[in-house]
Amino acid sequence: MAKSALRLKVREIRRTGESITVIARNLGLPKSSVSIWCRDIDLTPDQIKALLTRKKNGLKLGQIMGAMKNKEKKRENVEFFKKEGLRELSKMSQQEFFIAGVALYIAEGSKKNGRIEFINSDPQLIQFMMKWLQTFFIKDDSELCFTIFINEMHRSREEKVKQFWRAFLGAPLVRFRNTVFLKLQQKKIYENHDNYFGTFRIALLKSRLKYYRMMGLIEAFFKASVSSV
C-alpha cells in the first residue's frame, strides 16, 4: 500500500477512537509514525472515556490527561496569537498594502518569462494578489486571465473547481483559460479530495511594460531593505 494511502487509513481508524498503540500494532507500523500522522485529530470525550476503560491496551490516565492538557494549551496559544495578529494588523495603509504585494510577488510571482504571473494554491493569497493587481497595476479586469492547474484525477471535478475559484474571487468565467491537467506517474491520494481546488495562476495580458515595472520595484525593494538595516 502506498504511504499516502496507508496514512489515510491510519487517520480513518484513529477517528473511530482507536488507540495509537493498537493501530500501530495491527498495521505493523512504528508507534511514532502513527502518533505523528494523527497528532491533529482530537478524540471526542466518549472516545477518550472508552480508551481509559481498556486496561489491556496499557493506557494510563495520566498520559491521556497530559496529552489533552497539551492540546488545550495549543488551542489557547493559537487563539491568543490570532487576537494578537488582528491587533497588530487591524489596519493596513495603502503604502503597506503596496509593499506587501511587492514582497509577495517576489516570493511567488514569475520573474523570468517577461509577463506578470502569480501562481499559488492558497485561495487567500490569490485573492490578495488579485486585489493588489487591480489596485496598482491594471485599469480593468479585462487585462486579467486565469488558469487552473490540477491533477488529472480531478478531471471529473473540473466544473466544480472552476465554480469554486469563480465564486471565491468574484471572477467572470470568460477570463478563465482551459484547465491544465497534470499527468503524474504516480497518482497522489488526497485526504481532502473533494475539497481540493488545484493551483491557480493569475496572469496579465500584454504586460511587458508592467513586467519591467515589477522588476524595477523588486530591485528597489532589496536596495531599500539593505539601506534601512
Image (tube, rainbow, N blue to C red):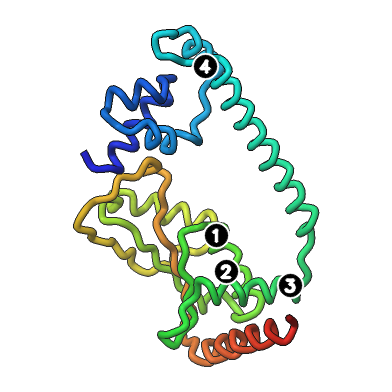
Tell me how far mark 1 sits from mark 4, CA to CA. 41 Å
* Local crowd size for mark 2, using a 10 Å CA cut-off: few (<14), some (14–19), many (≥20): many
Residue 92, horizontal then vertical, whole percent = 76, 66
Residue that mark 4 sits on: 48
- Point out the tag, 1 or 4, that comes first from the N-terminus: 4
Residue 61, horizontal then vertical, whole percent = 55, 14
Tell me how far mark 1 sits from mark 2, CA to CA. 8 Å
- Point out the tag, 3 or 1, that comes first from the N-terminus: 3
Q: Secondary structure at mark 1?
A: helix
Above or below residue 193? Residue 165 is: below
Tell me how far mark 3 sits from mark 4, CA to CA. 47 Å
Q: Amino acid at mark 4?
A: Ile
Q: Which mark is residue 129?
A: none
Left or right: residue 144 versus residue 89 is left
- Point out the tag, 2 or 3, that comes first from the N-terminus: 3
Q: Which mark is residue 169?
A: 1
Nearest to viewer (mark 3 / mark 4): 4
Q: Amino acid at mark 3?
A: Glu
Q: Name the residue located 28 percent from the left edge and 53 percent from the top edge.
A: 155
Q: Cβ–Cβ below 8 Å for labels 1 and 2? A: yes
Left or right: residue 217 versus residue 209 is right
* Local crowd size for mark 4, using a 10 Å CA cut-off: few (<14), some (14–19), many (≥20): some
Q: Name the residue located 34 percent from the left edge and 54 percent from the top edge.
A: 158
Q: Amino acid at mark 1?
A: Leu
Residue that mark 3 sits on: 96
Q: Amino acid at mark 2?
A: Met
Q: Secondary structure at mark 4?
A: helix
Residue that mark 2 sits on: 130
- Point out the tag, 3 or 4, that comes first from the N-terminus: 4
Q: Name the residue located 35 percent from the left edge and 20 percent from the top edge.
A: 22
